[in-house]
Amino acid sequence: MKLEFCVACGSKDDLQHRHLVTKAKGGSDAEPNRITLCTSCHDKLLHRQRNGAYTHSKHIKIALAARRARGASIGRPKKLMPDQRKEVLQRLELGEPRADVARSYGLSVATINRMVRSARLSGGISDPRN
């Protein structure tokens, strides 16, 4: 959209009407695909695009894939050690209420529910409902 001021800084000098999505990338000449920028803001935008400032998510995905390849865990640490998880699941299979089990380990019932759901999906537990 052609405006009388820069949409980034508000300047009224040296205005340029540019494409949001360039024609090279499939953008059209339609008004909704146009933006008004001053020369300075346009130069900053081009500099960021050229230097990869808008490829942050791609860099994150590459870094996470590299961590996984090295065997590093991603995400927050587990609340319980593997032997404690087994013990929790055994207590639940014996019929102990989830709230009591959660309280004894300092966990929330929601954490116990996620643990049970995860174990059920992996085939490690039947469906204890209490």
Image (spheres, grey):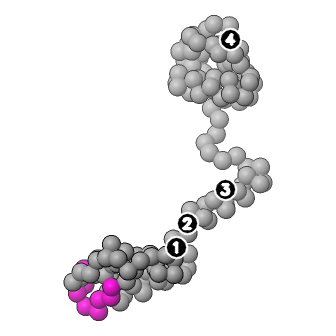
For the point 67% across and 62% down, the residue is 62
Task: Point out the stretch of residues depicted in magenta.
Answer: 8-17
Give x and y (percent) for residue 88. Answer: 67, 18
Q: CA distance from mark 3 to mark 4?
A: 36 Å
For mark 1, what is the residue? Answer: 53
Give x and y (percent) for residue 101. Answer: 59, 15
Disc 2 on helix, strand or loop? Answer: helix
Amino acid carrying mark 3 in the image? Leu
Mark identifier at residue 91? none
Amino acid carrying mark 4 in the image? Glu
**109 or 121, which lies in front?**
121
Tell which circle, 4 or 2, labels the residue nearer the N-terminal end: 2
- Left or right: where does residue 107 sit relative to residue 68? left
Amino acid carrying mark 1 in the image? Ala
Mark 2 and 1 residues: CB-CB less than 8 Å, in contact?
yes
Mark identifier at residue 93? 4
Give x and y (percent) for residue 6. Answer: 28, 81
Disc 3 on helix, strand or loop? Answer: helix
For the point 74% across and 24% down, the residue is 123
